[in-house]
Amino acid sequence: GFDCIAIENSPAYLFCLRGLKKSLQKKFTIIDKSFLESKEIHETSFDIVLALNLFHHFLRREDDFNKLNMFLENLRCNEMYFESHNFDDPQLKNAYINMREDEFADYVRIKLRLSNYETIGSASDGRPLYKIS
C-alpha cells in the first residue's frame, strides 16, 4: 500500500529489479540512474529512505564526498534506515575521509537536519544499522 521508489543504475541489478517487479506483480517506480543525478529525488519528500551499504562508497574521493554532502543536504525525509561501513574496511584505507560508524551516522543525521540516530542492529558482516529520525 505504500508508494515506493527504487533507484538503481547498475544494468545487471536493473534487469533483476525489473524482473522481480514483473514476476511478483508489484507496483513501484524504478529510477534507472544514480541517486546523485536524480531530479525526482530532490523534488520528492519521503517518509522513509533506505540507504543500505551505499554512502561509504562516496568517502573515497573528495569530489564524490562533496556530491554526497550536496545530496544529503537536499534530501527531504522524515526517517532513514542507514547501514554504515565498518571503519576498518580495507577498501577505505586511503579514502579521502573515513569516519567511525557512529560518527558517520551522526554526519548523515546532521546533513538531513534530523534530531536523532540510534543503532537498531547489524548486518551479517557486522556493519551497523541505524535509524535516523
Image (cartoon, grey):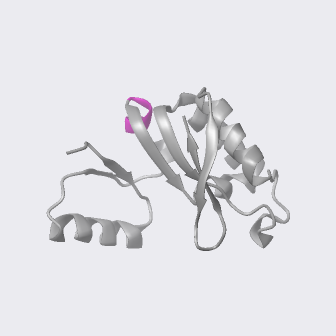
Picture layout, residue 75 above or below residue 60: above
- Residue 98 within the magenta-colored segment of the rendering: no
Q: Position of residue 92 (x, y in %)?
A: 78, 64
- Residue occupying the far left of the picture: 25
Residue drawn at (17%, 71%) of the image: 23
Chief secondary structure of the magenta span? helix
Where is the C terminus found, in terms of image quarters? top right
Q: Give the side of residue 131 with respect to residue 65, left or right.
A: left
Q: Is residue 98 left or right of residue 45?
A: right
Q: Nearer the viewer, residue 129 or 74?
A: 129
Q: Residue at x 72, y 46 (%)?
A: 104
The front one of 9 and 20 is 20
Q: How many marks?
A: 0
Residue at (79%, 53%) from the top-left corner? 100
Nearer the observer, 68 or 85: 85
Q: In the picture, which quadrant includes the N terminus?
A: top left
Q: Residue at x 24, y 51 (%)?
A: 28
Q: Which residues are magenta?
A: 39-43
Q: Quadrant of residue 40?
A: top left
Q: Is residue 76 left or right of residue 21?
A: right
Residue 18 point in image, percent of width and height: 26, 65
Q: Position of residue 22 (x, y in %)?
A: 17, 66
User: Where residue 10 appears, x then y in whole percent?
Assistant: 44, 65
The image shows residue 69, relative to residue 25, as above or below, that is: above
Furthest residue in direction right, as rendered: 94
